[in-house]
């Protein structure tokens, strides 16, 4: 390093050191206040005091993003605050979060994105077990995939939602990027591409342009495809970057999906209802009487009250008395009087109606 | 929540919000200074400017730990600063760090511990490939296990160190905890315990006290043991908590090792020498002439100059002209004149001598 660059660098380092000392003092203050919150909550006579407040965390992160001046990308700044909150929350209550393993799965990434790294992720082997772990209080919360651009609606989650006593208390979206994974060394050495049929479809244009001569074969899952590519060096799999790490394959190409808006939606399941955060959604399941026009009739109150449905998904029910179950998300919190009244009106017109919970719209991209 | 607890909680939240705004402002300032550092370094005419400075990071973390007031555990506070530095460094230069995959391995945990989560971990399939990836500049740095309480010295790493042009530029220790993993449901249902022989030995007392009737069987690795336990529900494996996640086994018991000081030492390999941080080590390899007393004679200068050896490990050499290679770590930095002179004196007495590098003693537990 030259003399002329060394001096200004040393001065900047001194400035950074002074800033670090201030940041540390403030984080320590924040930690002391978090302990004070825990003390008040437990002194208030609540044996079952709730320390994780999704609505509060959403509000904090929204403010961080709003006031961010761009020195760091807003997303990175939010991640740092996500960690600071995670460390402070661990002082109040160490949280155990159940998810569908193995480690490195998208569900695991979802746990870290939603809760930060100071919680204890708890891998279980099925979505049913995520619900069970929370229901039996082996874990404080569970994170489950709800809808997946690659594999569509996650029916195992839907099945559990019908019967669970748990509430939806948070949501998050995880961007899913398809990669071409192979140990072939380079694109021109790839003879065959294996992947889940939907992944092949989602990368059709890219495959036509870049691997016009490769054979395409659909297999049962992208994880299976990665496993096959590991065994056959002239094959490539379409799967996540995480899969490359798990199956020690090289990433030949990233982001090969034709549609770059590919995400998976996850829900946080817990025992407690979430308070309003200012920007919320409410999830419900219902069935309607088996006669024509029944669905539109049941949904009318939403339209009349100007309450937006952000999602409606139907699926065949397993009972005889009705044909379809409808999974519906609307904007607004059930504690908002207009939303509450409208939900009551809809429930009256439904054959069966179950409120899954209200939760903050995720501030994290 | 009762009326009497609600008011103080709201006041505390307002205080936390004010603190968060200040923290954010300071982190933004820090990020702007990091960009300024990058600008000066690149303007200084250095095309190959070095942005990651292990000695500087060690100094920052040491200060964080020293001035910590205990509101947060020092370890957690250091982790938060580790992340803040990682986010700021990503602005200067996004780093790719090669490690021995798969994701979830101890090496992966070592990457995150040393570099924070804003770098790109790059899984490769062997320790040789970690060295190669850095040598070919596919990755900026590599993290390799050097010594492992469970499996002893990592000879694949030793082999690479002999020939590599890379330098050791950092170290870290990762605590290794053995867990009993099984899907048996409870301890009394475990019929057989499988693990690497050293892991079985390390947990002998615990096994005698808690599973006196279980059969013990040594297998080639703890990962293999976990795989077997996954296939046989009445078996248990001794392995890491990470393995439980990878193989979807339940953790029946944590920390079953008789000696709680079980750690693995990792080194960071890179192209650049690390400057002195104030508390450093220097690593070297040497061979001595094949005659009695040659080793003691070669090491004498260390004793005479009061330079402590923190580690000396011998291994048979593959060449004929000498019998043993010695891997030695001493306290101090090679730029310190006393250390430099002493290393020269030792080198003169050695048959072959290679300096691997000087690096900061890790401030992270």
Image (spheres, coloured by chain):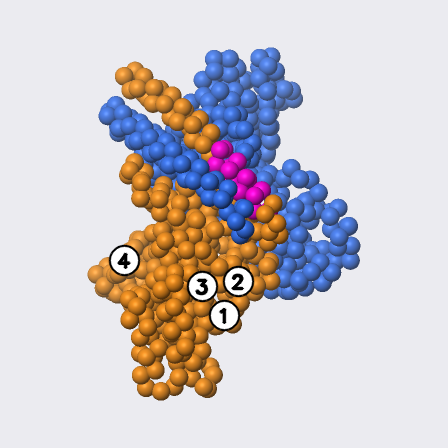
Chain colours: A blue, B orange
Question: Which circle's residue, 1 or 4, is located before the other in the chain?
Answer: 1
Residue B31 within the segment the image draws in magenta:
yes
Element type where label 4 sits in the image: loop
Q: Are marks 3 and 4 on the same chain?
A: yes
Is residue A191 positioned above or below A122 on the image?
below
Check whether the beta carbons of the residues at disc 1 and disc 2 lie within 8 A of each other: yes
Disc 4 chain ID: B
Residue B33 within the segment the image draws in magenta:
yes
- The image quadrant of residue A247 is bottom right
| Residue under numbered circle 2 | B130
Report the residue at 41% width, 71% height from top: B344
| Residue under numbered circle 4 | B260
Q: Are marks 1 and 4 on the same chain?
A: yes
Disc 3 chain ID: B
| Residue under numbered circle 3 | B357
Is residue A144 positioned above or below A49 on the image?
below
**Which dot marks residue B160?**
1
Check whether the beta carbons of the residues at disc 1 and disc 3 lie within 8 A of each other: no
Question: Which circle's residue, 3 or 2, is located before the other in the chain?
Answer: 2
Foreground disc of the pair 3, 2: 3
Q: Provide the residue span drawn in magenta.
A: B28-42
- Report the Cα–Cα distance between label 3 and label 4: 30 Å
Instruction: Estimate the x, y position of residue A51 in percent, counting from the top left.
Output: 35, 30
Report the residue at 42% width, 84% height from top: B322
Report the residue at 27% width, 17% height from top: B4
- Report the Cα–Cα distance between label 3 and label 2: 18 Å
Check whether the beta carbons of the residues at disc 3 and disc 4 lie within 8 A of each other: no
């Amino acid at each position: 390093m030259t003399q002329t660059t060394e001096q200004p660098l040393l001065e900047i380092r001194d400035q950074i050191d002074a800033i670090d000392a201030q940041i540390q003092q403030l984080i320590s203050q924040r930690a002391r206040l978090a302990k004070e919150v825990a003390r008040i909550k437990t002194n208030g006579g609540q044996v079952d005091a709730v320390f994780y407040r999704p609505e509060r965390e959403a509000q904090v992160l929204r403010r961080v993003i709003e006031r961010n001046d761009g020195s760091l990308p807003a997303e990175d700044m939010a991640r740092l605050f996500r960690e600071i909150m995670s460390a402070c929350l661990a002082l109040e209550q160490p949280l155990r979060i159940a998810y569908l393993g193995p480690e490195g799965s998208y569900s695991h990434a979802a746990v870290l994105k939603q809760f930060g790294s100071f919680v204890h992720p708890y891998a279980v082997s099925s979505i049913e077990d995520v619900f069970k772990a929370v229901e039996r209080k082996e874990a404080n919360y569970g994170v489950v995939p709800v809808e997946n651009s690659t594999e569509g609606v996650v029916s195992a989650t839907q099945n559990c939602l019908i019967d669970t006593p748990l509430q939806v208390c948070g949501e998050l979206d995880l961007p899913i990027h398809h990669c071409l994974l192979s140990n072939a060394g380079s694109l021109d050495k790839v003879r065959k591409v294996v992947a889940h049929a939907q992944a092949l479809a989602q990368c059709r244009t890219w495959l036509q342009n870049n691997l016009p001569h490769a054979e395409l074969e659909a297999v049962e899952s992208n994880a299976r495809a990665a496993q096959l590519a590991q065994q056959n060096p002239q094959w490539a799999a379409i799967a996540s970057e995480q899969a490359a790490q798990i199956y020690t394959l090289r990433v030949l190409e990233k982001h090969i999906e034709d549609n770059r808006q590919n995400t998976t939606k996850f829900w946080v399941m817990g025992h407690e209802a979430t308070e309003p955060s200012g920007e919320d959604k409410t999830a419900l399941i219902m069935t309607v009487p088996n006669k024509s026009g029944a669905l539109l009739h049941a949904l009318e109150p939403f339209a009349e009250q100007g309450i937006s449905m952000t999602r409606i998904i139907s699926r065949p029910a397993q009972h005889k008395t009705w044909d379809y179950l409808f999974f519906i998300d609307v904007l607004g919190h059930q504690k908002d009087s207009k939303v509450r009244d409208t939900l009551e009106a809809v429930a009256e017109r439904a054959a069966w109606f179950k409120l899954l919970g209200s939760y903050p719209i995720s501030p994290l991209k």
